Image: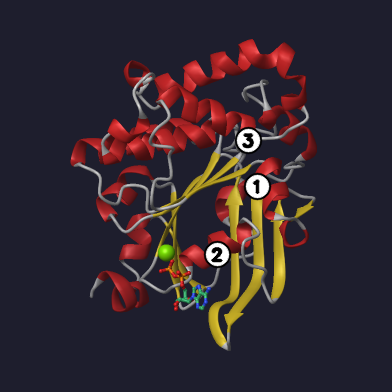
C-alpha cells in the first residue's frame, strides 16, 4: 500500500492549529511565526530519492506528518530510516523530490544549521552530552547554541530562559540531578538529558532515532510517557524497533522497506499486513 496523498488523520481537525498552546518563550516563538502550517501538515516528503554510488537508499519516498502527531517509523535494518532523517535535517541532499517543513520552508534549499534553527530537533542514537559539565550546564549550552533572534535579546530573556531550563528539568525528571556532572548519569538519564537539550530549543518537530535502545524497562516506560506528553505541543517522528514501546505510544505507524513506504496505519493494521510480516515482523 502506497501512502495516500492525504492521509485520513489530516482530514480530521484533531490537531491544534498553528501556534496554539505553544510556549511563547524562545526559539519556537520565532520559528512559529515563520512556519506556515495552516493545512495541518508539519512535514511533507514527496518522491524523495537518495542514492549512494548507485545504491538506492530511498526510492520515491512519500510521507506526511501532521501537526502535533506522534509517528513511529519501523522497518528492517537498511530500510532507509536514518537516511530519511538525514534528508529532513539537511545532512544528506536528495537526488530529487520534495521536502517541506510547514507550507513554505524548502528543506532541500536550507543548510543543516538553518533547518535546526527553523525548529527541527534531532536526537541521534548515541547520547552526546558533555560529561564533565553539569546537567544544568548541558541544558544551558544547548539553549545558547540556538542563535535565534530571541537569543540576541538575552539580557531580557535570561530569566525566562532559566525558567524554561527549570521546566525542562522537571519534564525529563532530572531536577534532583541538576548539579551532577552528566558523566555520572545512567545511560537512560543521559538519553533524557539529550532530549532535554532539544526541548530547551523548543523545536516544533522532533526526530528521535531508536530512543529506547539500551534502556531499562522503567526508563522505556518513562520515555513512552514523556513522548506522549510532548505530542500535540510538538510533532514527533520516532524510529524504534521495540514493538512494545511502539504499541504504547503510536497514533500512526509507517513501515519503511527498501527506501519506500511499505505500509501505514495503526500498529495493529500494519502488523496484520502480509507484506510487513514477510519483510520484517515475521522474521
Ligand atoms: N553515507 C552512506 N554511504 C553509502 N551507503 C549508505 C550511506 N548511508 C546509508 N547507506 C546505505 O543506505 C541504506 C539505508 O541505510 P539507513 O538509512 O542507515 O537504514 P536504517 O536506518 O533503516 O537501518 C543501507 O543499505 C546503508 O548501507
Ligand atoms: Mg538507522
Cα gap from disc 1 to disc 2, whole angstroms? 15 Å
Task: From the top left corner, tell me how far across and down residue 151 is, in percent.
Answer: 72, 26
Tell which of 247 and 153 is nearer to you: 153
Cα gap from disc 3 to disc 2, whole angstroms? 24 Å
Point out the tag, 1 or 3, that comes first from the N-terminus.
1
The residue depicted at 27 percent of the width and 69 percent of the height is: 281
- Single out the mark in the foreground, 1 or 2: 2
Q: Quarter-wise, where is residue 156 in the image?
A: top right
Mark 2 residue's CB less than 8 Å from ligand 1: yes
Hey, which residue is sitting farthest bottom in the picture?
54
Image side of residue 176 versus residue 19, left or right: left
Q: Is residue 98 above or below residue 120?
A: below
In the picture of the structure, the residue carrying the numbered disc 2 is 84
Task: From the top left corner, tell me how far across and down residue 205 is, in percent.
Answer: 58, 43
Other residues around mark 3 within 10 Å, as few (<14) / some (14–19) / many (≥20): few
Task: From the top left corner, tell me how far across and down residue 87 is, in percent.
Answer: 61, 63
- Single out the mark in the foreground, 1 or 3: 3
Point out the tag, 3 or 2, that comes first from the N-terminus.
2
In the picture of the structure, the residue carrying the numbered disc 1 is 42
Other residues around mark 1 within 10 Å, as few (<14) / some (14–19) / many (≥20): many
User: Looking at the rendered structure, which numbered label has been put on residue 145?
Assistant: 3
At mark 3, the secondary structure is: helix
Hey, which residue is sitting farthest front in the picture?
132
At mark 2, the secondary structure is: helix
Q: Quarter-wise, where is residue 223 in the image?
A: top left
Image quadrant occupied by the C terminus = bottom left
Q: Is residue 201 above or below residue 159?
A: below
Amino acid at each position: 500500500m502506497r501512502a495516500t496523498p492525504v492521509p485520513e488523520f489530516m482530514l480530521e481537525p484533531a490537531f491544534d492549529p498553528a501556534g496554539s498552546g505553544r510556549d511563547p518563550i524562545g526559539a519556537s516563538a520565532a520559528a512559529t511565526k515563520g512556519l506556515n502550517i495552516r493545512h495541518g501538515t508539519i512535514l511533507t516528503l514527496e518522491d524523495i530519492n537518495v542514492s549512494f554510488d548507485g545504491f538506492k537508499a530511498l526510492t520515491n519516498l512519500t510521507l506526511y506528518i501532521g501537526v502535533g502527531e506522534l509517528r513511529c517509523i519501523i522497518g528492517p535494518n537498511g530500510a532507509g530510516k536514518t537516511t530519511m532523517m538525514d534528508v529532513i535535517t539537511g545532512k544528506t541532499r536528495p537526488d530529487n523530490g520534495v521536502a517541506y517543513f510547514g507550507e513554505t520552508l524548502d528543506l532541500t534549499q536550507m543548510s543543516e544549521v538553518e533547518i535546526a534553527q527553523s525548529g527541527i530537533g534531532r536526537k541521534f542514537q548515541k547520547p552526546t552530552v558533555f560529561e564533565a559539565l553539569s546537567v544544568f550546564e548541558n541544558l544551558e549550552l544547548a539553549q545558547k547554541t540556538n542563535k535565534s533572534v530571541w537569543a540576541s535579546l538575552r539580557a531580557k530573556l535570561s530569566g525566562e530562559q532559566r525558567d524554561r531550563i527549570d521546566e525542562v528539568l522537571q519534564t525529563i525528571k532530572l531536577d534532583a540531578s541538576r548539579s551532577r556532572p552528566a558523566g555520572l548519569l545512567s545511560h537512560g538519564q543521559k538519553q533524557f538529558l539529550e532530549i532535554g537539550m532539544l526541548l530547551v530549543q523548543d523545536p516544533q518537530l522532533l526526530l528521535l532515532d531508536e530512543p529506547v535502545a539500551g534502556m531499562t524497562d522503567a526508563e522505556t516506560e518513562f520515555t513512552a510517557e514523556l513522548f506522549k506528553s510532548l505530542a500535540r505541543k510538538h510533532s514527533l517522528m520516532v524510529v524504534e524497533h521495540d514493538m512494545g514501546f511502539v504499541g504504547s505510544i503510536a497514533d500512526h505507524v509507517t513501515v519503511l522497506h527498501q527506501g519506500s513506504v511499505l505500509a501505514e496505519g495503526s500498529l495493529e493494521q500494519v502488523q496484520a499486513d502480509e507484506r510487513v510480516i514477510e519483510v520484517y515482523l515475521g522474521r
